[in-house]
Amino acid sequence: MPFIGRSMTRREDRALVRGEARFTDDLGAADDVPIVDAVHMVVVRSTVAHARIVGVDATEALALPGTVAVVTGADLAGTVSPYPVVSRDGATLADAPVEVVATGTVRYVGEPVAAVLARSRATAEDAAELVVVDYEPLEPVASVDDARRRVAVVHDAAPDNVLVRWSHRSGDVDGAFRDARRVARCHLHIPRLVAAPIEVRACVAAHDAADDLVTLWASAQDPWRQSAQLAAVLRRPEASIRVVVPEVGGAFGSKGSLVPEYALAAWCAIHHRVAVRWFEDRSENFLAAYQGRGMQADVELALGDGGRFLALRADIAADIGAYLYPNTPNVAVTTAMLMTGCYDIAAAEVRVEGLATTKVPTGPYRGAGRPEAAFFVERVVDVAARATGLDPVEIRRRNLVAPGAFPHDNGLGHRYDSGNYPAALDEACRLLGYDALRAEQRDARASGRLLGVGIASYVERAAPGGWESAEALLAPGGRVVVRVGSSPHGQGHETTFAQVAADALGVAPDAIDVRHGDSSAGPPGVGTYGSRSVTLGGSAVLQACEGLLARATVAAATLCGVDPADLDYRDGRWSRRDRPDEGVGLADVAAAALDAGAPMRADARFTIASPVFSFGTYGAAVEIDPETGRVEILRIAAVDDAGVVVNPLLAEGQVVGSSVQGVGASLYEEVVHDADGQPVSGSFVSYGIPSAPDVAFELETALLCTPSPLNPLGAKGIGEAGSIGVPAAVDNAVVDALAPFGVEHVDPPYSPERIWGLVAGRPDARAGG
Amino acid sequence: MELRLTVNGAQVSGDVEPRTLLVHHLRTALGLTGTKVGCDTSSCGACTVLLDGRSVKSCTVLAVQADGCEVTTIEGLADGDELHPLQAAFHDHHALQCGYCTPGMIMAAVSLLRERRPLDDAAVRRGLEGNLCRCTGYRGIVEAVLAVAASEDARPGAAGAAVAR
């Protein structure tokens, strides 16, 4: 029985549950990290949203015993290059890369202005408070509307405050809208969110002057993007940089690009000849780690006879923040390219403007553009349902891309590889108990209860970024060591990759060791993001192990004195067809290869031509307390199709975890800045993420399987599913519950205050900030 | 200041700055890095340890406040190679992904199992309200704690005793 497709508990767990796993701030001498002489870095951050830096006075800080150095933008000038930000998918970008330390102008509260190095963390914090920064205030640009009104220009390179521009048009959009029987319209807003991994950002940087090697131990999603971007910023060849990613306490997109503070620590290590460690506070993570979402859209859907979707138009505005990280522009463009959703829509026109605001930059957060697309599309579909009098399930069923119509060009530049959208819709309705809920809703409404039911179908682009690689090595004793470029931060790569390798090699997963996370050891990689690791990294593991088995079979044949075709292979052992009792095992082949001085190994680099497209349908049932405005989620049904799933236990874990993050986005989470651009939500006290009692609702999950034709595993991605499906489904359920009040739309989060305002007939609570 | 603690059964003493938090003392002076730091506001619970048998957030306790007390950290839970029942249950029920909240979550659950009976889904959720997990959605965590509670209840006369190791 194959191991692919089997629920297996994780090999990663043992060290983690014992408290023995090593996260970045746990590293020390035992990990070969030069911690003994390390200095602590504390960052001095801008306290204002937009200002010219008149001067930085570090006199008092330097006078504090234990202070080693104070580093400012002036020190870095001429020694660092801008972050490499390149356009993808045809986006036009302004030249506004994020800076390591502010030079001349600060553009958000929390922007690094200086770094203090000191012998102890406490001294560094004390010294940082003694650094005096003189600001000449400039007008803050606190919202997309402020940016469009040009209350100030954030970057001279973008006089119109537009940092990202993208548009696409296909089909006869104007004709379709002209001929439409009806047009469904809505204006939608999603607030900024924070990823909030429980481990904040952390690094240790050291410079070996003898070898001129910079080593960065970092809490990051992968070593590769840190390494490539660090090389560009520090103007060094990548070969002179080693990045090690130890255990990582979650990321959810927020540790993908090089963290400016990591670059700062590395710069300090080089120029001050000390090892530098940095572990931010939670408040710094709220202030300065790039945030997610922050997008609004005007969406129009032209409807023909029978509720047929004829054409879609969308204008999307993204609150980009003060600068572009390398992965910032991708988010809004990802949204734009998925705006036809799961539907067969012949004509579409979508425009994106990403606007500069004087707030912390945005970037990917779990879903990274797909939750926004699902929310925008699924909301206008429900508006269309209400306008046509069709049931929300029925109007979806009439417009979904048909199962026989793949590959499907979505009109916005994507080719969906495979799918069975009606099957996911049907299964979600069954799991949710859709028909029974509708009946219950009629009774509930008659007695004044506010029960709502919402459905959302989504399709997501998974496995972007082209390739991953793997190396399989036959080790002494017959164990197989698989080194992968792809590295995890909680996903369970070691367990799933061992399952893939086990099937390829016909052995048990226990016979496989999986290694990752060090840019100086093993094959190169791209990174863990965009639900890509199994599809790309797993396929690379599969091919490397197949290559290893082919080589080992040739070697086994030599040992047995027969032709490879005359051997049978099973359970790690080759036997002669003519004399089945005679044969050799993996250990024999390993020993022979070692004797010959040529360890047996095989490499593979799996490249995919285009992304794969996971999909699913989510359903939500909610009840609203009209007295308090509190939204209670009663039940969520999550139906996902990620093609072939290697480990259903872990896949379901991703669905459940991302669904709860989706509930956080729906009910609680919202980054708030005041009109001056000062953040108001700066801790877990003022920014609530779900705790265990908040998410006691029923959550029913199901995995369907429509394999992808684009990779040998048939896999797609599952890591972000619930963050995409849940908010859209819950939103439709909340609006459905409020239908008796004539409510046509409400933006998340659905706080009691906002909902109560609607129930009490307060129209000012209708839209978010 | 002079500080004497019993940590995971061993007596330790040393000099400590009065402003040192217990979590920093454990991690830095004693090298017990299993206890994590996750926030500045006593919100996340990653730093949960047992102080004289009851769970506390060690970022909210000065090291000197623990003088003379018994501290149990995640490193003190397993019996050699044998995992504590909660550690095993967290593994069995896929109650962790990144694992960063896990030490604090397990220590909070140890305390919960000792203090509160009977436990059902809602009681476990309430009992762990002070410990944040961003990965799992809590489902596996609740299942793991309930499984250990059930196995203890099934053992005659053993309610709560086994986890007090």
Image: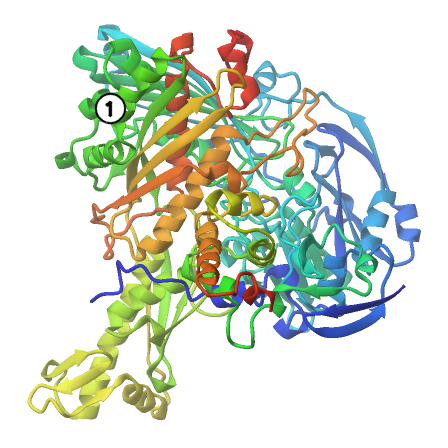
The one nearer the camera, A588 or A361, is A588
The residue identified by callout 1 is A393
Can see residue A69?
no
The one nearer the camera, A688 or A125, is A688
User: Image check: B58 left or right of B135?
Assistant: right
User: Image check: A3 left or right of A165?
Assistant: left
The one nearer the camera, A484 or B101, is B101
Residue A21 spot, x, y in % from top left: 56, 65
User: Image check: A134 left or right of A579?
Assistant: right
Q: Among all residues in the image, which is located at the extreme left?
A: A578
Give the residue displayed 40% in from the left and 14% down from the top.
Answer: A186
**Position of A762 relative to A535 (above/below):** above
Amino acid beneath label 1: Val
User: Image check: A68 left or right of B129?
Assistant: right
Residue A459 placement: quadrant: top left
Give the residue displayed 47% in from the left and 59% down from the top.
Answer: B153
Give the residue displayed 26% in from the left and 73% down from the top.
Answer: A505
Residue A734 placement: quadrant: top left
Can see residue A626?
yes
Residue A74 spot, x, y in % from top left: 77, 44
**Position of B85 relative to B146 (above/below):** below
Instruction: Give the total number of marks visible in the rendering.
Output: 1
Quarter of the C terminus of chain A within the rendering: top right
Residue A535 spot, x, y in % from top left: 31, 53
Disc 1 chain ID: A
Colour scheme of this structure image? rainbow
Q: Among all residues in the image, which is located at the extreme front?
A: B157
Quarter of the N terminus of chain A within the rendering: bottom left
**Position of A58 relative to A164 (above/below):** below
The one nearer the camera, A764 or A90, is A764
